[in-house]
Image: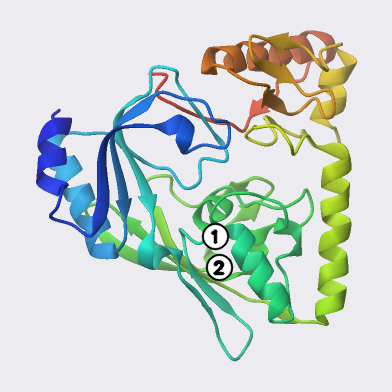
């Protein structure tokens, strides 16, 4: 594997920002993590395809980063290439029928706000959720009952080494925090079906949802959102709280006093601190309730 060869082959030759040793604490909502050996912000499909070709030739591992809102990066960093979809991947447009077509790199908050301005309903469940459209689709973001996947008319993906493929929304199984999309495919673009509605009604719905989030979640401290997936009919926050772990700390990390399914960075937290609290909560709930919690946080740079 030669990161240096990949860097030399890509730097100045593709429509992308190519960096060495970029600290991923700057690229994640946790504000935690060491450097990526190589970082590429691809501004076009051609740049992405060329990047993947070079990385494959040089044997360099890679990951699509998005906004890093559901990611915990090792304190040692990542010895592969972190890729961000930018430029043409961040564009979006509305059609006359009210549908929204957007690149995977488009910021979810901007799509939500622009849909409101257009008087189009359907993205209200995503209000207040950080990240990009690609990340939201890959984990089917939303609430327990309302998911963004239900709005997908079609989407375009890239399978490295094979090319692009288009899925109809109905060809994909969408569920709570899950999809049937192959994990080795990169979401490039999606078209969402939205519904005309009064902007005042949409705004009121969004504000009510945001008020509930503000009241129940620690939005003021760096985190990656919910740590564990809620089991059917149960609340992870309540399960962890019942084990006496609400407010538990390790180093600069803390199980939030506001919501026990959030682990926040109170300042200077390391990835090791967060992992300790994740393990502590998982073991306690398994011991006290017999529930094997499923962690939603994606880990990068921790090895096999």
At x 76%, y 50%, the residue is: 143
At x 65%, y 60%, the residue is: 148
Foreground pick, 297 / 210: 210
Say which quadrant the N terminus sits in: top left
Q: Is residue 178 above or below residue 73?
A: below
- Circles 1, 2 touching at the beta carbon (< 8 Å): yes
Q: Is residue 86 above or below residue 69?
A: below
Residue 286 percent across, percent down from the top left? 75, 13
Q: Is residue 154 left or right of residue 289?
A: left
Q: Is residue 162 left or right of residue 184?
A: left
Query: Neighbour class for label 1 at 10 Å: few (<14), some, many (≥20)?
Result: some
Q: Quadrant of residue 194?
A: bottom right
Foreground pick, 155 / 9: 9
Residue 234 percent across, percent down from the top left? 85, 32
Looking at the rendered structure, the secondary structure element under dot 1 is loop
Colour scheme: rainbow
Q: Is residue 304 above or below residue 283?
A: below
At x 57%, y 68%, the residue is: 170
Looking at the rendered structure, the secondary structure element under dot 2 is helix
Total labels drawn: 2
Q: Which residue is mark 2?
A: 169
Q: Is residue 46 left or right of residue 85?
A: left
Foreground pick, 201 / 137: 201
Q: Which residue is mark 1?
A: 172
Q: Quadrant of residue 50?
A: bottom left
Residue 298 percent across, percent down from the top left? 52, 32
């Amino acid at each position: 594997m030669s990161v240096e060869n990949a860097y030399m082959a890509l730097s100045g030759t593709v429509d992308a920002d190519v960096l060495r040793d970029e600290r991923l604490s700057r690229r994640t909502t946790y504000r935690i993590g060491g450097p990526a050996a190589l970082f590429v912000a691809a501004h076009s499909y051609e740049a992405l395809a060329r990047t993947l070709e070079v990385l494959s030739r040089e044997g360099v591992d890679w990951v699509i980063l998005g906004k890093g809102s559901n990611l915990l990066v090792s304190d040692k960093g990542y010895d592969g290439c972190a890729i961000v979809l930018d430029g043409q991947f961040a564009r979006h447009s509305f059609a006359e029928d009210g549908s929204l077509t957007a690149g995977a790199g488009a910021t979810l908050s901007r799509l939500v706000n622009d849909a409101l301005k257009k008087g189009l309903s359907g993205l209200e469940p995503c209000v207040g959720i950080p990240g990009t459209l690609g990340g939201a689709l890959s984990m089917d973001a939303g609430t327990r009952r309302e998911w963004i996947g239900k709005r997908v008319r079609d989407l375009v993906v890239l399978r490295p080494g094979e090319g692009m493929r288009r899925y109809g929304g109905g060809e994909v199984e969408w569920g709570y925090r899950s999809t049937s999309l192959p994990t080795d495919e990169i979401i490039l673009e999606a078209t969402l079906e939205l519904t005309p509605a009064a902007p005042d009604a949409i705004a009121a719905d969004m504000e009510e949802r945001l008020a509930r989030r503000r009241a129940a979640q620690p939005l003021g401290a760096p985190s990656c959102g919910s740590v564990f997936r809620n089991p059917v009919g149960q609340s992870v926050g309540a399960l962890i709280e019942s084990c006496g772990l609400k407010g538990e700390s390790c180093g600069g990390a803390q199980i939030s006093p506001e919501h026990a399914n959030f682990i926040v960075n109170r300042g200077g937290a390391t990835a090791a601190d967060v992992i300790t609290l994740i393990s502590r909560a998982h073991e306690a709930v398994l011991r006290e309730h017999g529930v094997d919690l499923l962690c939603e946080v994606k880990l990068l740079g921790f090895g096999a």
